[in-house]
Amino acid sequence: MKPDLQQLPLRDIHLPEPVSWWPPAPGWWGILALCLLLLMSTLLIFRFRKNGKLRRASKASIEQVFAEYRTHGDPQRLIDELSVLLRRISLSHYPRSKVAGLTGDAWLEFLDLGIEDTPVQRGFSTGAGAVLALAPYKPDIQIDVATLHNICLQWVSNLPAGSYK
């Protein structure tokens, strides 16, 4: 004897709920984390490469100013060109509001901040770099060109790793 299928208490076929897109599977979280890590590392690499280019260009400009001095031999012109160049380099690395208004001893103190913990500490305010503030008022001032050259290169080498802008 066969039971009648109409009389059995069976339910219709039950399909599972459709798979939701949220929350994603753990693999998708891993892919997201890798993409973010890749993006951050790319940004850091570009930032440091840009800073390296700026530092290399700054050193090359300083070398060019001193090479021109060797040809013309005018110490007043050297000081003028070096002052302008150091100001430009500073404005490239620091906010304008922090650098642009500095003159005299305040400017030299600011430059000394960039060469702390080096053998030429205070090379701008009390050393050979003091001529940057004194030369416009004393045209016959004596300049230690080799020391000034080293101080400027040391200052550029110690510029911060990234610009503060």
Image (spheres, rainbow, N blue to C red):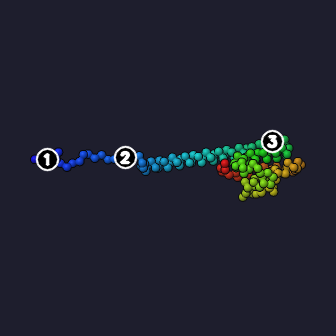
| Residue of label 1 | 3
Left/right of residue 24 with respect to residue 163 in the rendered view: left
What kind of element bears circle 1?
A: loop
Left/right of residue 123 with respect to residue 93 in the rendered view: right
Q: In terms of sequence position, does the residue under pointer 2 or pointer 1 come before the other? A: 1
Residue 68: mark: 3
> Furthest-left residue in view?
1
State how far apart marks 3 and 1 are (Cα): 110 Å
State how far apart marks 2 and 3 are (Cα): 73 Å
Q: In terms of sequence position, does the residue under pointer 3 or pointer 1 come before the other? A: 1
| Residue of label 2 | 19
Residue 53 point in image, percent of width and height: 67, 44
Considering depth in this image, is 100 or 9 the residue closer to the camera? 9
Q: In terms of sequence position, does the residue under pointer 2 or pointer 3 come before the other? A: 2
Left/right of residue 106 with respect to residue 55 in the rendered view: right
Considering depth in this image, is 45 or 107 the residue closer to the camera? 107
Residue 123 appears in view: no
Residue 108 point in image, percent of width and height: 78, 53
Q: Categorize mark 3 by other alpha carbons within 10 Å: few (<14), some (14-19), many (20+).
A: some
Please give the name of the residue rendered at 30% of the width and 46% of the height, measured from the top-left corner. 15
Please give the name of the residue rendered at 76% of the width and 45% of the height, measured from the top-left corner. 85
Please give the name of the residue rendered at 47% of the width and 47% of the height, measured from the top-left corner. 31
Q: Amino acid at mark 3?
A: Glu
What kind of element bears circle 3?
A: helix
Q: Categorize mark 2 by other alpha carbons within 10 Å: few (<14), some (14-19), many (20+).
A: few
